[in-house]
Image (cartoon, helix red, strand yellow):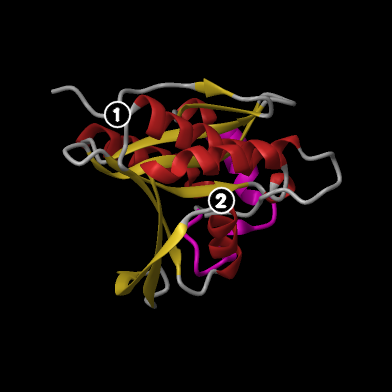
């Protein structure tokens, strides 16, 4: 049975998104070690030695049709610097979530996150004809929530006691979305962000 969405890769000026594979393991293990990102208890970033297992987990979800995972490639050097996905895929209702995203610390607050979101949102709305795209994060993760809000996504609410975290705590999940009617304005906003002169603030963070 065909999976929706189909696999694809896409290039921007700063970033390339390509289907995640074990070929990315070495780069991504190094990326996860940059800043010890896995120590942030309220996120779900793999520790460096577990990156291969995380790649395999995401690929297994691709086989079930619930996720389409990508490696985020920094075009300045050709290295994989993070992961992102379409997840919680609802083909019948043409909805996806953009999530399980993280980047190595050294590229956070660079154009990479902005362009990554632009490329994924553009594909979702113009190629997949999605009616809505969701973003979810831990309620207390202010950095992630602010990054989502700067995209122009609107706050839908909180799923209380939504997930059990690795340390046994219970996550309240903040849910945001962009709907199809909002996409033209948000696309223009993201393109403007990317065209800002160097040195002015750009969207950043990890979701």
Q: Position of residue 80 (x, y in %)?
A: 60, 32
Question: Pointer 2: what residue?
Answer: 151
Looking at this view, name the residue that lies furthest to the right.
199
Category of crowding for the residue at label 2, using alpha-carbon neighbours closer than 10 angstroms: few (below 14), some (14–19), many (at least 20): some
Q: Position of residue 17 (x, y in %)?
A: 52, 28
Q: Position of residue 62 (x, y in %)?
A: 29, 34
Q: Residue at x 37, y 25 (%)?
A: 127
Q: Any magenta on residue 137?
A: no
Q: Residue at x 21, y 36 (%)?
A: 91
Residue 53 in sight here: no
* Local SS, label 2: helix
Q: Position of residue 181 (x, y in %)?
A: 39, 43
Q: Is residue 102 above or below residue 85?
A: below
Left or right of residue 149: residue 74: right
Question: Pointer 1: what residue?
Answer: 5
Q: Nearer the viewer, mark 2 or mark 1?
A: 2
Q: Any magenta on residue 33?
A: yes
Q: Which residues are magenta?
A: 25-45
Left or right of residue 30: residue 196: right
| Res. 37 image quadrant | bottom right
């Amino acid at each position: 049975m065909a999976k929706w969405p189909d696999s694809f890769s896409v290039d921007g000026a700063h970033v390339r998104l390509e289907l995640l594979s074990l070929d990315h393991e070495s780069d991504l293990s190094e990326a996860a070690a940059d800043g010890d990102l896995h120590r942030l208890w309220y996120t779900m970033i793999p520790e460096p030695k577990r990156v291969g297992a995380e790649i395999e987990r995401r690929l297994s979800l691709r086989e079930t049709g619930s996720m389409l995972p990508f490696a985020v490639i920094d075009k300045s050097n050709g290295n994989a610097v993070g992961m992102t996905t379409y997840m919680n895929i609802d083909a019948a209702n043409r909805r996806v979530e953009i999530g399980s995203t993280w980047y190595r610390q050294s590229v956070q607050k660079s154009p990479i996150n902005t362009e990554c979101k632009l490329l994924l949102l553009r594909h979702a709305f113009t190629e997949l004809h999605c009616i809505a795209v969701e973003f979810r994060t831990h309620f207390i993760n202010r950095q992630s929530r602010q990054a989502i809000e700067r995209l122009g996504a609107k706050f839908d609410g909180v799923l209380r006691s939504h997930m059990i975290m690795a340390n046994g705590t219970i996550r309240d999940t903040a849910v945001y979305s962009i709907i199809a009617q909002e996409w033209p304005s948000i696309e223009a906003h993201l393109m403007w962000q990317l065209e800002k002169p160097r040195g002015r603030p750009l969207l950043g963070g990890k979701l």
